[in-house]
Image (spheres, grey):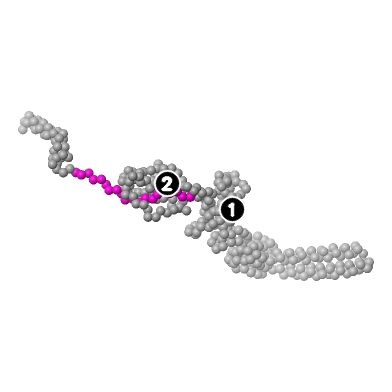
Amino acid sequence: MNKTAQFIIILVVGALGYGAWHYQDRLPFIGGNGDAPAAVKRDRPPQSVIVSAVVKRPLPRTITAVGTARANESVNITSKVTGKISTLDFNEGQRVKVGKLLVQLDDTELRANLTESEAARDNAQKLYDRAIKLYETRNVPKAQVDLLLSELQAAEAAVSADKARISDYRIVAPFSGVLGFREVSVGSLVQPGVVITTLDDMDTIRVDFDLPEAFIADVGSGQKFSAKNIAYPDRIFEGVVDTVATRVNETTRAVRVRGSVPNGEGLLKPGMFLSVELEVSVDEDALLVAEEAVVLTISGPLVYAVREGKAVRTPIKIGRRIRGFAEVIEGLDEGDQVIIEGLQKVKDGAPVDATSAVKTSEAS
């Protein structure tokens, strides 16, 4: 085939291609107006979602802090004197009343001294009584009577001193409470400062916690608070603020608050870590949205509100959170419907088939 024939073929093919492109709408099986049926464009069905309404509810304004449990009264039982233990009259973990004898030290020598002192006192009393009778008949001078009186008073003081020393050998419970571990045995020689056991009054637990100085105006005596401990995750302990410290820590700029929690069951122990929540006020008309409706993004939190049958991406500003709800500061109004289930399948502007939640929880 010569070059002229090849050139003519190329021109014909090009002309046919251009014509097909230019008149494609009129050609069968290519355009939309030919004899062949045209492709029908189908819309996606609305996505089924579950929605919940934005509601107004009272929302407490609370302060959270870390607290430490302390016994209402707590003491280490020790001896004031050096002595050998002759009797231990208690058991570990025993609940005792105030004045209960716990430890008796060997006081044999002191009791002998007391017997001697009492004998000297009795003799001084007799001499004084005889001198009084003789003085009435003017057979004894007044100076002799005064001398015998001073000797009697000295003898009585000696008896009192011996009794006081003997009482130091009796160790009793200074208040009612629960005893701890026994650290000594019968026959042990104890000295002042040696811990024999511990005694704690735990019927009431004191709770100490620190608050930033910004909250000083919100806290006062008689205010209620709640406390929780990891050992009892489903238990809330209710307490009352007793005292707010008169000084602010210059380093931490925090003020110490002390409250009390009834502990009749003995669940709380001194030294426990407590999570404290203090209610300072209540916002009666807070806007609340279910937490599961909130989507956190780099640009901020948002929800998908349902408006006119479509999902609408709606940025919001949230505040406090409470028991499955988040406070809405900006972006929504009361009664707005937001998607809480099916979020992963919806897109902004997509049609949705909304079903209200079977039961909408209420913040409390």
Residue 305 appears at what percent x and percent y?
37, 46
State the separation of the CA atoms marked 2 and 1: 35 Å
**Mark 1: which secondary structure?**
loop
Residue drawn where x is 74% and y is 67% of the image = 110
How packed mark 2 is, by other alpha carbons closer than 10 Å (few <14, some 14-19, many 20 or more), is some
Q: Between 100 and 167, which is closer to the camera in this rendering?
A: 100
Please tell me whether residue 49 belongs to the stretch shown in magenta: yes
State yes or no: residue 252 in magenta. no
**Residues marked 2 and 1 touching at CB (< 8 Å):** no
Across and down, in percent, residue 273 comes to 53, 55
- According to the image, label 2 marks what residue? 334
Q: Position of residue 147 (x, y in %)?
A: 87, 63
Q: Is residue 220 above or below residue 158?
A: above
Q: Residues within 10 Å of mark 1 (few under 14, many from 20)?
A: few
**Tag shown at residue 222:** 1
Circle 2 SS class: loop
Q: Nearer the viewer, residue 277 or 74?
A: 277
Residue at figure coordinates x 60%, y 46% from the top left: 248
Residue drawn at the location 84% of the way across and 63% of the way down: 150
Residue 12 image offset from top left, x and y in percent: 10, 32
Residue type, numbered disc 1: Gly
Closer to the observer: label 2 or label 1?
2
Q: Which residues are magenta?
A: 39-59
* Quadrant in the rendering for residue 193: bottom right
Does residue 258 appear in this view?
Answer: no
Closest to the observer: 189 or 97?
A: 97
